[in-house]
Image: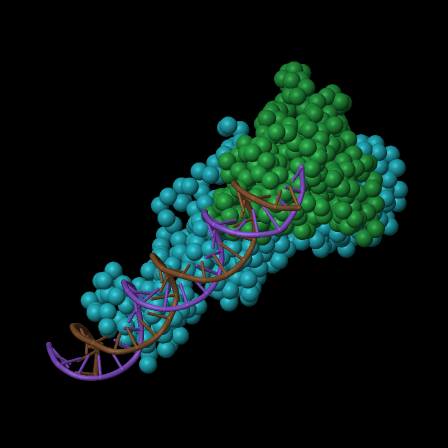
Chain colours: A cyan, B green, C brown, D purple
DNA sequence: TGTTAGCACTCACTCGACTCGAGTGCTAAC
DNA sequence: GTTAGCACTCGAGTCGAGTGAGTGCTAACA
């Protein structure tokens, strides 16, 4: 037995209906609501075939049928009429971002909010990471005696800073001179390379070695520390609106998964650096998400770093809508992070 | 009819039991589990009196009784045996913080996690704000042509930074000289005063006026912008563990309240700057929280700024435990934020 | 050979009747 | 003032019949 055109059409109707209603769909529903020109009995036969082929499941004998993971897979890969971005959304994204946008964290947070409000699912946005950014400027700003703020500007426009110990009483000018020397020496290197170069520098620049030690310690710990990648989660409560989560225990499990941020980041990033991925149910590899799907997309920054945006929803997700919203948001973020910073300030200034 | 010693003891037993179990408590339970030396019938009479006095409610005739808001109020104000901090917690707080702590945001996030894991309720931590911090250093770090990062260090040790437009092509040295001049001029002023002084400065320091304009714009918007206060929420899923929230709709309302961060911050901060506040049920003033209680405490920074930590739980909250945990955390945060930063780096270095 | 009408069958779900038991209020005795 | 006893209330749980959506199968039809 093989799939034919008609089976595909019926399967599509079933998936569409189930995504819409969340209720197992029966043969009669299909023959009436969708204009197939076939009686329910025929549909029934076809559905029986589709079940045998592994595309449909039956919760119990006297209920309708629901799409299997395999069906969703097929749907996403080829059946889905990949809609363009919903009319309202494109404008919506723009509009939401049009206000004041300064810090990267704020953009990330806002993006998560927008995605979840547009999709009505749970959204996750991860800050850019990946390709090593290259150092552009180092500058040390005195904070208190013996301490300074090390500001590191990279070519991706992302700034990291941290308070480090510089020892003794360095006056502003001394720190500034050290900063200049460091910048000259290190500009254009990746953070990896900077770390590698540090021991040699410490050797050479006697007299300011405590400063360099401090900086080195910070860089070394920061480089390996994924904690600095910012993550925003939006619409956690949205999931509770779906009957799939009317069971409180299930909901709690899901929510506490969202709370373990490291794990969540791994899951979202699990898709690698593909432009788009859709993982359905078991494909997520997370037992707690056996009946969730995860859709992710990437965006990139000027420096070539990649960030991830994702949506988590029930397997009966409105995939096409979600994909186009993520697409729109990805484009918007890419633009925001790689367009020159002038535009941001422009917006800001206008207020 | 008046409250006497015995009524108080009985009321306390009822509250204790209800907080523990969440089930309406009957007269027999009290007479057996709590060593009153009274029969259930007597207790029954007393309970009847307590109900008349407004301290107890009866969900329905044949159920036990539950404490009213008034009862909790009395309990918190005078009945509660204000336990010292639970044995495990004091150490726990220390231990959790002993790892790497650098950015304020991280401390805040971590604090929320710790509080919620210790209390098993939902926790909220707000970054310090209030008393105007005084400027200590301004420094401009070049980021790209025409743009610079303005780093502002205040005496509270809290650092703000933002990318501003500086116009033209300022080289490092020029920016540095401007920074020095600005620092000299503005050190010791509150941010309010800095803003007030800016127009005059812009007048005087012709030639670098575009830089100053940019800085002014940032300061002016930042000063009035409460968005910069960081807020962390922990243990959102904890609430679902309590039978009070076995109703999914209720849970969803609660969760979406947690998501509207501005509103939540207002609610938490609603208590003003009291060292401790306990708001019970309707006292919260938030309809969605009619059967929640909010306990808050404050901590302070070197610069005299105040931050807020809070716990949101069901009205039958383990008040004494929560209060002592918040007390411990408040002390720890105050120490962290007002002790000199040396200690932090020390910890960091040890790793 | 594919399609359809008809029919028996399944099974979750609903709803009312019933039981059970925790808890109360009241009364009378101590 | 305290307590034992008892009738009463009412939510929660159980049981069973009824309902209806949906299926699979068979036989008739185009």
Q: Can residue A25 be seen in this view?
A: yes
Judge by depth and name the residue closer to the eye, A278 or C8: C8
Residue located 75% across and 28% down the image? B303
Q: Position of residue B120 (x, y in %)?
A: 65, 49
Q: Where is residue B222 in the image (x, y as percent from the top left)?
A: 61, 29
The image quarter in which residue A105 lies: top right
Judge by depth and name the residue closer to the eye, B41 or B316: B41
Q: Where is residue B183 in the image (x, y as percent from the top left)?
A: 74, 25
Residue located 83% across and 42% down the image? B343
The image quarter in which residue B54 lies: top right
Judge by depth and name the residue closer to the eye, A271 or B120: B120
Residue located 31% across and 63% down the image? A13
| Vertical side of B253 occupied by B209: above or below | above
Q: Where is residue A111 in the image (x, y as percent from the top left)?
A: 51, 45
Q: Is residue B140 visible?
A: no
Residue located 28% across and 75% down the image? A45
> Left of A233 or right of it: where is A159?
right
Q: In which quarter of the image is the N terminus of chain B?
A: top right
| Badge count | 0
| Vertical side of A242 occupied by A7: above or below | below
């Amino acid at each position: 037995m093989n799939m034919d055109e008609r089976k595909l059409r019926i399967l599509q109707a079933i998936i569409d209906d189930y995504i819409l209603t969340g209720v197992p769909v029966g043969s009669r529903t299909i023959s009436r609501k969708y204009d197939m020109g076939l009686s329910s009995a025929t549909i029934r036969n076809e559905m029986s075939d589709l079940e045998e082929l592994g595309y449909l499941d039956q919760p119990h004998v006297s209920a309708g049928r629901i799409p299997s993971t395999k069906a969703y897979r097929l749907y996403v890969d080829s059946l889905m009429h990949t809609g363009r971005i919903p009319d309202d959304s494109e404008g919506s994204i723009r509009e939401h971002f049009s206000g004041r946008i300064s810090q990267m964290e704020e953009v990330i947070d806002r993006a998560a909010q927008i995605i979840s409000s547009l999709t009505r699912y749970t959204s996750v946005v991860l800050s850019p990471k990946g390709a090593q950014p290259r150092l552009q400027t180092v500058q040390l700003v005195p904070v208190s005696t013996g301490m300074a703020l090390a500001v590191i500007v990279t070519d991706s426009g992302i700034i990291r800073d941290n308070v480090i110990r510089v020892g003794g009483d360095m006056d502003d000018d001394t720190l500034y001179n050290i900063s200049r020397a460091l910048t000259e020496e290190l500009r254009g290197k990746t953070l990896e390379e900077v770390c590698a170069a540090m021991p040699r520098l410490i050797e050479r620049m006697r007299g300011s070695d405590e400063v360099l030690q401090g900086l080195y310690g910070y860089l070394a710990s920061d480089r390996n520390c994924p904690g600095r990648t910012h993550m925003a989660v939006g619409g956690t409560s949205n999931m509770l609106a779906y009957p799939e989560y009317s069971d409180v225990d299930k909901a709690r499990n899901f929510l506490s998964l969202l709370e373990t941020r490291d794990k969540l980041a791994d899951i979202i990033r699990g898709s690698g650096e593909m432009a788009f991925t859709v993982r359905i149910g078991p494909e997520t590899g997370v037992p707690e998400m056996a009946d969730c799907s995860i859709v992710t997309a990437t965006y990139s920054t000027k420096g070539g770093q990649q960030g991830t945006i994702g949506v988590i929803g029930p397997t009966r997700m409105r995939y096409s809508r979600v994909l186009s919203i993520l697409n729109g948001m990805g484009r918007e973020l890419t633009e925001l992070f790689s367009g020159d910073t002038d535009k941001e300030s422009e917006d800001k200034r206008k207020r």
